[in-house]
Amino acid sequence: MYIGVSEIGLPEELLIRLTDDEGTGSVNQQRAEAAIAGAQAVVDSMLARRYEVPFTEAPAAAKKLTADLAANNLYARVGSVPEYLEKAREEAMALLEAIASGKAAIVTVGNELPGFSGSGREFSREYMAGF
């Protein structure tokens, strides 16, 4: 998984309320991980148009998108989703669509910006000192 339960971004007390149907007083790891798996499936299905997924080391953007969707999934399973999370889901889906269509890109781990190579400076400060 791209993120762990603690990376969903919700306080533990809230995670307990959203996952603890049995009243044990602790986070139900299976339910939380199911929400993450569902979110990651959406992320992967959209990014698969342009990237090889699942990522072996998830880029930060994939983690953030997964966390936003997972939080939304947790709320959706117990009732209504707060407006701020619904907006985060809409923004995540719009970004995923933009990435999938080539209008945006995700920086993957290991991808580096193109380098520059060439000869040294011909007109250095020392060379140009008298001009």
Image: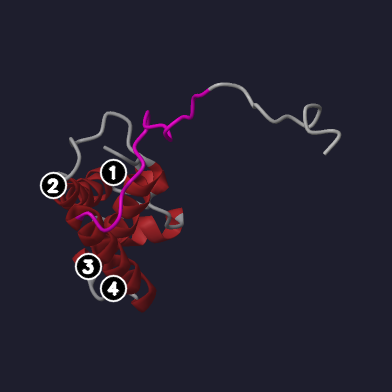
Q: Tag on residue 15?
A: none
Mark closest to the chain's N terminus, 2 or 1: 1
Q: Amino acid at mark 3?
A: Ala
Callout in the foreground (3, 1)? 3
Q: Amino acid at mark 4?
A: Val
Gap in angstroms between the C-alphas marked 3 and 2:
27 Å
CB within 8 Å, label 4 to label 3: yes
Check disc 3 and report its element: helix, strand or loop. helix
Callout in the foreground (2, 4)? 2
Q: Which residues are magenta?
A: 102-118
Mark closest to the chain's N terminus, 3 or 2: 2
On the image, numbered disc 2 is attached to which residue?
A: 49
On the image, numbered disc 1 is attached to which residue?
A: 29
Mark closest to the chain's N terminus, 1 or 4: 1
On the image, numbered disc 3 is attached to which residue?
A: 76
Gap in angstroms between the C-alphas marked 2 and 1:
31 Å
Q: Tag on residue 81?
A: 4
Q: In this rendering, is residue 89 above or below 43?
A: below
User: Residue at (51%, 24%) from the top-left corner?
Assistant: 118
